[in-house]
Image: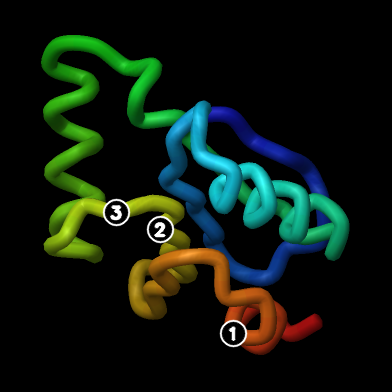
Amino acid sequence: MQHVPGVDRGRVILYALSTCGWCARTKDLLAGLGVAFSYVYVDLLAGEERDRVVREVERWNPRISFPTVVVDGAKVIVGFREQEIREVVGV
């Protein structure tokens, strides 16, 4: 898990794939908004760590699709939904 510093808008986690254009746009949006967030490229993980993170994603998004953004362990946004992301992080 990598952390991007910024303004605290709650615990924001981005589950992404390193080859996914929509994931890159979501990461760029969060960074551009100045929001502190953590992200992980699930496809770059291996073994038990990958299995654990895939189970985390599945808990929030049963289709296990990317990007998946989880805010404060309560709000989940699947896909690049700029307006919804802006609303959830309060920007």
Query: What colour scheme was applied to this rendering of the protein?
Result: rainbow
Q: Residue at x 42, y 64 (%)?
A: 70
Q: Amino acid at mark 3?
A: Ser
Q: Residue at x 24, y 11 (%)?
A: 46
Q: Residue at x 51, y 29 (%)?
A: 19
Do the CB atoms of the residues marked 2 and 3 lie less than 8 Å apart? Answer: yes
Name the residue beneath numbered marker 3: 65
Do the CB atoms of the residues marked 1 and 2 lie less than 8 Å apart? Answer: no
Name the residue beneath numbered marker 1: 84
Instruction: Kindly report the distance in space between the C-alpha atoms of the residues bearing marks 2 and 3.
Output: 7 Å
Q: Residue at x 40, y 58 (%)?
A: 68
The reply, left or right, for residue 42 in relation to residue 62 is: right
Q: Amino acid at mark 1?
A: Glu
Name the residue beneath numbered marker 2: 68
Disc 1 crowd rating (10 Å Cα; few below 14, some 14-19, many 20+) is: few
Q: Which quarter of the figure has residue 86?
A: bottom right
**Sequence-wise, which precedes: disc 1 or disc 3?**
3
